[in-house]
Amino acid sequence: MRYVSTRGQAPILSFGEAMLTGLARDGGLYVPETIPTLDKDAIAALAGLSYEDAAFRVMRPFVGDAFSDDEFRSAIAKAYAGFGHAARAPLVQLAPNHFLLELFHGPTLAFKDFAMQLIGQLFQIALQRDGRRVTIVGATSGDTGSAAIEAFRGLDNVDVFILFPHGRVSEVQRRQMTTPSEGNVHALALDGTFDDCQSRLKDMFNHFEFRDAVGLAGVNSINWARVLAQVVYYFTSAVSLGAPHRKVSFTVPTGNFGDIFAGYIAKRMGLPIEKLVIATNQNDILHRCLTTGRYEMGGVKPSISPSMDIEISSNFERALFEAYGRDGGAVAQLMDEMKAKGGFAVSQGAMEWLGETFASGRVSEDETRASIADERAASGELLCPHSAVGVKVAKDHLGAVPMVTLATAHPAKFPDAVEAATGIRPGLPPRMADLFDRAERVTRVPNDLAALEAIVHERRAR
């Protein structure tokens, strides 16, 4: 199994190499050279399996010889052993033909755990086997960082540095990143937005002397293994609703496009998905692009769904690669234009592809609050603000085909917003009840590449 860069100029890698590399050396993102498919019988055979067994069958074709079957099965089993629900990703019915896919039963109460827990196990196997040590640097709008720290804390072969925007994550999200005591994890509060964090991360990857000196590796949603792990729950939920003999649609609250792109991969693999609906908050650059044909930055406005407060949607590059017929040169030109001018126009042919592949919707702050309150009254379900954005957009796309909205985080991660909308302050699960009593350990850092690189050099283990 071979992986190519969306910009066409980086070395072709195996799954293991692409996973440990993260961002390609030409600045692009790795994608499979070809996408494996599952026939109807193989999809139907997923019915009734444990989540772990289904995950092995869905992901195995992408892994090649990077891991043996025993290694891969063991990594999957360890990854999901700590989840708080036996089904791992259970479905809850909200209304006729509308279902909620609960993706918040992992150790940090967010969908990022599905990928990050698995990557942690795979990294450990690969690094121990090769006698290597890496430095992971990640950027987060809230959930990726805590999931990465939880997955890699205490591991022998990894140092982890997580950048998050100072003052722009919820208190629960912050404390999940700043309270782990293991010496190999470091929380860095950057003066700026998530897009600033993500830009400095990419700058570090593109500074090859630094990248090679510290053994830099990435686990942001730019990492292909992150996308792959998220493909699984599209299959398990769709099969529960009758696939492959019945079509299913999905609505995905997204800012960085990784979760919805996983749905596209599931569809390409043969899952009968009718609609893939992008749900955005007031930072609606993806919705505006799909409706106007221009990807144009205009500034991020803080919202009550902060994990979606993003303008530079990294994984959208993977969609553009497909929309432009896998022309790496065309994608590289668009990315150069965005860096120079803050935006670009999508060609007519690419817009047609995007319009045929995705639908989209935008939800305001008031509509998000109303969605939380309305769903509590209608079904008794308590939604986090991101999931509420998804539910609101999904309601505009309901039809004869079952709709699954992805619930990306537990409401207790955003208690202020939920309480303001419903009068109910959601509590943390018992295993996290002492989160607010734990000591925090965090470093505030300027939005400066040299300063960040100096901290990484100084604090990583030798």
Image (tube, helix red, strand yellow):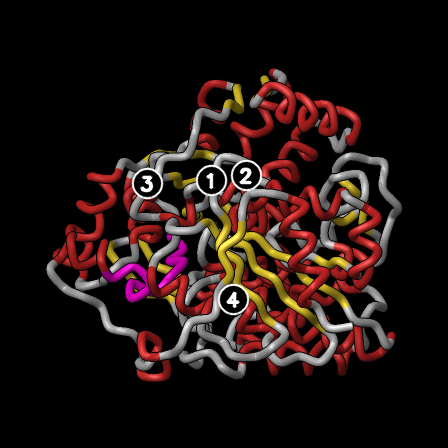
Query: Could you tell me residue 255's position as x and y percent?
Result: 47, 43
Please give the residue where the numbered disc 3 appears in the rendered image.
393
Report how far apart the C-alphas of labels 4 and 3 lie in the structure.
26 Å
Q: Quadrant of residue 364?
A: top left
Dot 4: few (<14), some (14–19), or many (≥20) neighbours within 10 Å?
many
- Say which element carries label 2: loop
- Which quadrant of the figure contains the C terminus? bottom right
In magenta segment, residue 192: no
What label does residue 310 carry, if any? Answer: 1
- Say which element carries label 3: helix
Residue 399 visible? The answer is no
Please give the residue where the numbered disc 4 appears in the rendered image.
147
Please give the residue where the numbered disc 2 appears in the rendered image.
313
**Residue type (three-letter) at the residue carrying disc 4:** Ala
**Residue type (three-letter) at the residue carrying disc 3:** Val
171 in relation to 125, above or below:
above
Counting residues from the start of the chain, the first of labels 4 and 2 encountered is 4
CB atoms at circles 1 and 4 under 8 Å apart? no
**Residue type (three-letter) at the residue carrying disc 2:** Ser
Dot 2: few (<14), some (14–19), or many (≥20) neighbours within 10 Å?
some
Q: Residue at 76% across / 61% down in the picture? A: 20
Of discs 2 and 3, which sits in the foreground?
2
CB atoms at circles 1 and 2 under 8 Å apart? yes
Q: Residue at 62% across / 24% down in the picture? A: 338
430 in relation to 424, above or below:
below
Counting residues from the start of the chain, the first of labels 3 and 1 encountered is 1
Query: Could you tell me residue 293's position as x and y percent?
Result: 52, 19
422 in relation to 332, above or below:
below
Front residue (pair 301, 287): 301
The span shown in magenta is: 402-415
